[in-house]
Amino acid sequence: MLPVVHNPNYQAIFPPGHRFPMGKFGAVARVLAELGFAPFHTPAPAPASWIALVHERAYVDQVLSADVPARIAREIGFPMTPSVALRARTACAGTTLAARLALEHGIACNTAGGSHHARAEQGAGFCVFNDVAVAIRVLQADGAIARALVIDCDVHQGDGTAHIFAGDPSVATVSIHAERNYPVRKATSTLDRALPDGMEDAAYLAVLDETLERALALPADIVFYNAGVDPHRDDRLGRLALTDAGLAARDARVIAAVRRAGLPLVGVLGGGYMDDVEALARRHAQLHLAARAALA
C-alpha cells in the first residue's frame, strides 16, 4: 500500500472568495479516502528548529507569531494568521514524514507540499515555508541522506528552491515550467526547461523524457517530485495546455524513471488553480494513483 501523509491542518481557515483554492486539501483527502488510500499517516507540526535549517530565524518567528510584515504578506498572498502558520509548519512536517516513508517503502506521497517559491529570507507566491527544502535539510542533518534531487513539474519555476540550494552540490534542482509565467525574474536551477505558451501533451512529454534522462544522471539518494497540476489547459494560472491524460502520463513517466534509477521518490502536491475544487482534487489524486500503481 502506498504511504500517504495527510493532516486536516493542511487546510487553513481562509476568507471566502480568496483566489487560492484552499478547500482543495480537504477535497484531496476525501477523494483519496474514496479511492482506498486511507488510513493516512498524520504528521505533527514541524518545530521551528527544522524550519530554521532553511529559512532565516527572524522570518520563521514572524510567521509563527502571525506578525509578518505587510510587504512580505502581500508577496505571499495569504492572510498571515495562526491558521496559515500552522498549515505551513504541518506541510513541512508532512513532506519530511513522506520522505522518511519513501526511504522505507520506495515511494510515499504528501497531500500538500511543493511550496517552491519560498526563499530563505521570506515566502512568496502562495508559499510560506519551502517544505521540500526543509525535508532535505532535516534528512541531511539526521544522516538519512547525503544528496537529493528535486524534479519540479509545476507550471511555475521552482525559484525559491533554486535560490536555497544555489551553490550547494549536495542538492540538484530541476524545473520544467512555462517560460512566460510567474515569477517574472527566474532563478537558475541546476537544470531549467522553460516551455512556450500553449504546449500540449505530446511535445511536453518529449521534453519531459529528455529532461528526466539528464536529471537522473545526477547523483542523488532520494528524489522529490513536485506534481503541480497547473500545466493543465483549464488552469487559471497556467500557460500550458496539458490534458488530464497528459498529466497522468507525466506522473507515470516521472515515477517509472525514478524507479528504474533505483531511487526512492517523494511526491508533493504542487499548484493547481480552478473554482471546481472537486475536479481539481481528482486531478491532484492522479499522482497518488500513479504512485500506487508503481508499487503494485
Image: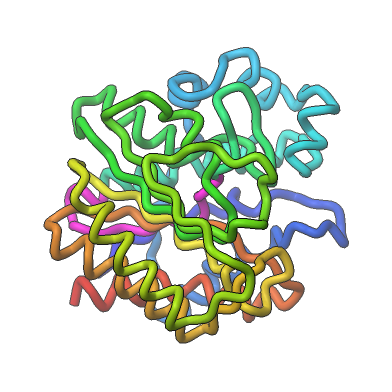
Q: Is residue 233 left or right of residue 291?
A: right
- Res. 222 visible in picture: yes
Q: Is residue 253 left or right of residue 134?
A: left
Q: Quadrant of residue 279?
A: bottom right
Residue at (38% x, 58% y) in the render: 267
Q: Quadrant of residue 79?
A: top right
Q: Is residue 170 above or below residue 281?
A: above
> Residue 152 in the image: x percent, y percent?
44, 53
> Residue 11 in the image: x percent, y percent?
65, 54
- Res. 5 visible in picture: no
Residue at (18% x, 57% y) in the render: 105
Identify the colour scheme used: rainbow
Q: Residue furthest top?
A: 58
The magenta stretch is 101-115
> Residue 220 in the image: x percent, y percent?
20, 42
Residue 121 in magenta stretch: no
Q: Is residue 53 left or right of residue 244?
A: left
The residue lying toward the viewer, choosing from 179 and 77, is 179
Q: Quadrant of residue 144?
A: top left
Quadrant containing the C terminus is bottom left
